Image (spheres, rainbow, N blue to C red):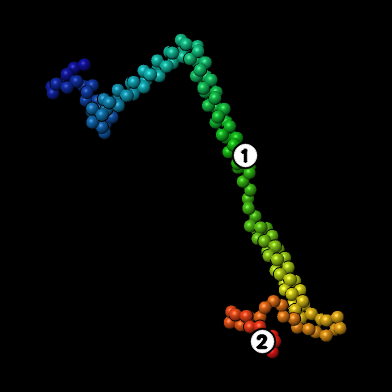
Amino acid sequence: MSISKTGESPLLSISVFPTTHPLFAARKIKKLVKKIIDVIFFQEELENNPMKLLEERTEASKNEMDRMEALEELQELNKRTVKVDYDTMLSRYDKIRAKEAEKKEEEDEEFIKSVFGKEPSGAKVKRILGKFQINGSLDLDSFNG
């Protein structure tokens, strides 16, 4: 390595991260080296400590089982979701409404027959059920006279 006329080392002029400031580049390099060292120490610890290796394998197996369980739950949810057939649903509701309308009409007819029914003698009789009201008040005199 030779030092240039400006006094800088040629390695300092090589930019690892060309768009960043040299201090930020140094911080990034330091973090990257620290991560690499941590991984190396972790791998060595796993190689030297069989219990640690067993713990890591157990944890990995547990995580894999959890992921599989979650996947199975999602598959079951997808099976449960049923496509809604709106035409069939609406036709069922139309049938229910038609039956209710028929029932109401039959009740109305029965009421009309009870009000305008025939006497046993065969004569038609108009019956007034309940109380007769005029302007929100009872007017019983209209029946008497």
Tell me residue 11's x, y (percent): 23, 21
Quote the CA–CA distance across marks 2 and 1. Answer: 73 Å
Which residue in the structure is indicated by mark 1? 76
Assign a secondary structure to mark 2. helix
- Residue nearest the viewer, comparing 108 with 24: 108
Vertical comparison of 49 with 63: above or below: above
Q: Residue at x 50, y 15 (%)?
A: 53
Q: Quadrant of residue 24?
A: top left
**Label 2 or label 1, whichever comes before in sequence order:** 1
- Three-letter amino acid code at the position of disc 2: Ser
Assign a secondary structure to mark 1. helix
Q: Nearer the viewer, mark 2 or mark 1?
A: 2
Vertical comparison of 21 with 124: above or below: above
Residue 91 visible somewhere in the drawing: no
Q: Residue at x 21, y 16 (%)?
A: 1
Q: Quadrant of residue 133?
A: bottom right
Is the residue marked by circle 2 packed among few (<14), some (14-19), or many (20+) residues within 10 Å?
Answer: few
- Residue nearest the viewer, comparing 89 with 12: 89
Q: Which mark is residue 142?
A: 2
Residue 61 visible somewhere in the drawing: yes
Q: Quadrant of the C terminus?
A: bottom right
- Three-letter amino acid code at the position of disc 1: Glu
Q: Residue at x 72, y 65 (%)?
A: 99
Tell me residue 104's x, y (percent): 71, 69
